[in-house]
Image (cartoon, rainbow, N blue to C red):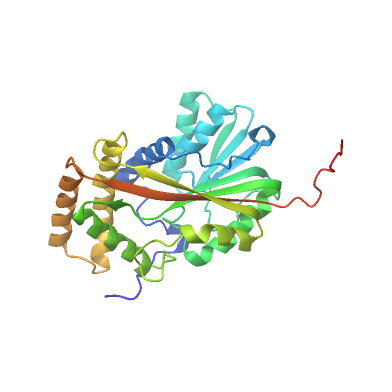
Amino acid sequence: MPAHFDLPPPEKGYVFDLESGPELTRLIYQERLLTNALDEQLPESLDLSAVHDILDIACGPGSWALDMAYRYPKINVVGIDISKSVIEYVSANARSQGIEDNVSFLVMDATKQLAFPDNSFDLVHARLLLGFMLPDAWPALLQECLRITRPGGVICLTECEGSLTSSPALEQLNGMGMLAMKLAGRSFSPDGRSFGITPMLAPLLRDAGYQETKIKAHAIDFSAGTVHHNGFYQDFVIILELARPLLLKLNLTTQEEAERLYYQALAEMMQNDFCALWYFLTAWGKKSDPFPPARLDS
């Protein structure tokens, strides 16, 4: 078994090919699924009436940014993503929805210095950066986020671990996938049995200088018979296929075994007794305000 996978350069560091049709289609579908399925990902204490500018990092097809721009027309929302195809798609989507006045999208690499002035945003949001962020790249990104966040502003990060299901084949493939991320240098896990990112979110924020860090867990039930089952079944149809070349390159499986497990997993997901949960964690922190408002005593 190889000790390390020869990664592409960091600027092309996403696990799958973002410019491919199947992956773009999957991202569009998955992001809408997650936006609908996840609980509120913003801090309950966040006063959106005091928020004027929001940045969505690695916005993908942009459903979160578009929803925020639609719901809060007085807030300026900016989404960035490394994929030109994704940015063209979401920009056209914003125009078609008639909300381009308060939302815009830019091609930008989140692993490099962000092209925004200091103190530009009241809220910085990011979801599922695990697909391209190397563990040692997180501190630099969060320092950049701190730089562009206004005093008193908030950063909000949401990441996931692997799903837990009753399907033997899907569990075997999930295990291979998490081990592949470890071998590829993309995981915080010491042994490759998880992605290991969720326990690190709050400590990473604190190390970057954010204050008042807190966390909130989410679980999506996509068992048979639930409202989310079919959507996540369709997501796994694509992602398990896209993951196969990486598993083969890392010698974690053979072509024959991978195909057998793929069709077995899909069949088991369609059984009436299929049970499944997907765990996510949101962590947030606040940039300290060196000049907080003076307290007015009654």
From the viewer's perspective, is 194 left or right of 136? left
The residue closer to the viewer here, 87 or 297, is 297
Foreground residue among 175 and 6: 175
Identify the residue at horizontal 81%, vertical 49% (top origin). 291
Query: Is residue 100 visible in this depiction of the protein?
Result: no
Image point 23% across, 60% down: which residue? 172
Q: Say left or right for 167 vs 201.
A: left
Residue at the spot 18% in from the left edge and 41% down from the top edge: 270
Q: Quadrant of residue 273?
A: top left
> In the displayed structure, would residue 177 be above or below residue 292?
below
Between 140 and 92, the residue placed more toward the observer is: 140
Quarter of the rendering occupied by the N terminus: bottom left
Return the x and y of residue 237 as percentages of the image width and height: 24, 45
- Using the image, determine if residue 244 lies above or below residue 188: above
Q: Is residue 60 left or right of residue 57?
A: left
> Is residue 23 at least partly visible in the picture?
yes
Residue appearing at x 58%, y 52% in the figure: 214
Q: Report x, y in % for residue 6.
A: 36, 70
Left or right of 1, for residue 138: right
